[in-house]
Amino acid sequence: MSDIDDIVETRGILNAIHEGIIMIDKDMNIRFLNRTGAELLGVPQRESIGKDIRKVVKNTRLPEVVKTEKSILNSIQRLGDSHVIVTNRVPITDKNGNVVGAASVFRDISEVKELAKKVTDLEKIKTMLNAIIDSTYDGISVVDKDGKGILVNKAYTRLTGLSMQDVLGKPATVDIAEGESVHVRVLKTGKAVTNVQMKVGPKKKDVTVSGAPIIMRNKIVGSVAVIRDTSEIVALTRELEKTKMLLRKAHAKYSFNDIIGTSSDIKIAVEQAKKASATPATILLIGESGTGKELFAHSIHNASNRCEKPFIRINCAALPQDILEAELFGYEEGAFTGAKKGGKKGFFEEASGGTIFLDEIGKISMRLQTKLLRVLQEHEIIRVGSTKSITVNPRIIAATNIDLTKEVKEGKFLPDLYYRLNVIPIYIPPLREHKEDIPLLVDVIIKKLNQEYGRIVEHITEKALKVLNAYDWPGNVRELENIIGRSMINAGYNARVIDVQDIPPLFPINALKNVKKISAVENYVGSLSTIMESIEKETIKKALSITKCKKEAADLLKISIRSLYYKIKKYGLTEGKRNDRV
């Protein structure tokens, strides 16, 4: 048996191989052809055995290998119109090293060639996509699933001032000067994020960033972000705000739709204000600081037939009385040092036909009260430094947070002026008198502050609302907005819910009142530490009385449950059965 016969004996194995195999002896006769080889060559397998290779495969080079006794490797050969093969041809030798034939192993590379063409096409597409990405005005940043930079465009480097080397392969936070990485948030939540304001790069460029996850086979494999330059918009917005500040005195920006509340007290106040807006009568808004008196004044003006005319707002307590007089009544040229050439109109003249809102009216001097009374009685003003009367017709809305009747009794406020102002009094209740409106107010405040702070808070928990309801709100709605703002900051950038732990410390009772109670009622005298312990004791008692369990009381007081137990024992406090649950 020849060496070729020895190889052929393994035909079972060779037939199973995916590559084509053909063997010839030194007489050029085919001694073996496996199944794959026959299929690729398009010839019958059994009938080909024993035939001259040159008659079966026309462009064969196996005879050349037998003659030269040299291998021909990695040769490309076309078989008909449908197949292209790569072939390795080697001589077959016997035990003595004599060439007794040749073998060829070949593989169809038509699919590989087509794939190569596709790869070439993909490279063209990639080049085109890169050109498109680089041509966009907005910056584009892509990170992998680990948050490492893998692609940025030219606009990105222009916006951030960072080079590709500064970003590629680096953490997603490398470009952020102020704010939180959108990439990190997207990779963490698996959700798109839109219009997040932040500052990027060494120059702290103002930008808005939107990001989205890159998903392949239902798995997040990265994140893509679009960065838009807003520095010009920010600059223009600042200029616009300055202009608004200058024009604010001449325009009212709120309406009754901006007054939030469904409680009976708020409804009554709004209904009174709506009825009053239909008349030219003088209105006196009465309420504590932060209740929304200015909001009512704006709304009344905008609902009146004077809404197209000027609305001028002035805080009577914010200016020295002499300056306030000049602002309200105007002045003539030379009336005082620094007076403008040609004089200046006062707010009463500018508001003629419109509305003038006099906030904190109770703080004006007696001399100004007398001049204001003349405006209300005669509809006339006299400029500072002049003797000439000027007819004016402004609608006056006054506001006060002090008891004017008490001021009248004490001789601090003119009775006639009080009666002239008090034509239509509207009482705006403090927040502690309509706490049922707190959920509505909180919802509106959250939406407003989301835009201002770039947050995504959706709601507040019932436990947190309970904490807010337990507080008396001496600063009213203004204080509530302040507390919600601080709570959103405490909750963090990704927070969607405000919970108890996010609310800054609020005491269910006023500590100063406790001090007065200790000092006046109990006639207590002692060291500061002892007074503070007494206040702490009263505060814990109040917390236990308004909560269902010790855990809620501890949350309300911002202390651990262990500390609460210690303090209960320390002060010898007892609670009802409802407080026995943790």
Image (tube, rainbow, N blue to C red):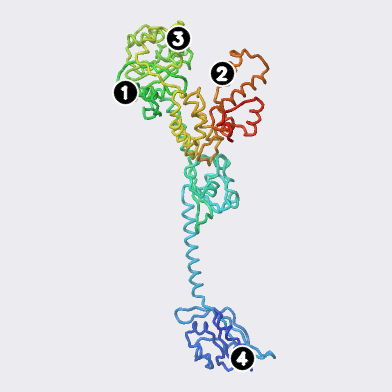
Give the number of the disc on residue 423. none
Residue 465, percent from left and from top: 49, 32
The tag earlier along the polypeptide, 1 or 2, is 1
| Residue 17 % position (x, y) | 56, 80
Identified by mark 1, the residue type is Ser
Question: Would you call the spot at circle 3 few (<14 residues within 10 Å), some (14-19), or many (20 or more)?
Answer: few
Q: Which mark is residue 304?
A: 1
Spatial CA distance of label 3 from label 4 is 126 Å
Do the numbered discs 3 and 1 sit on residues whose CB atoms are within 8 Å? Answer: no
Task: Look at mark 2 in the image and give the residue it sits on.
Answer: 513
Q: Residue furthest front?
A: 577
Q: What residue is shown with label 4?
A: 5
Q: Which mark is in front, 2 or 3? A: 2
Please identify, in this view, whether the residue under mark 1 or under mark 2 is nearer the observer.
2
Disc with the residue nearer the chain's start (2 vs 3) = 3
Q: As rendered, which of 550 and 222 lies closer to the eye?
A: 550
Of the two numbered discs 1 and 4 on the same chain, state the one appearing first in sequence.
4
The residue that mark 3 highlights is: 406
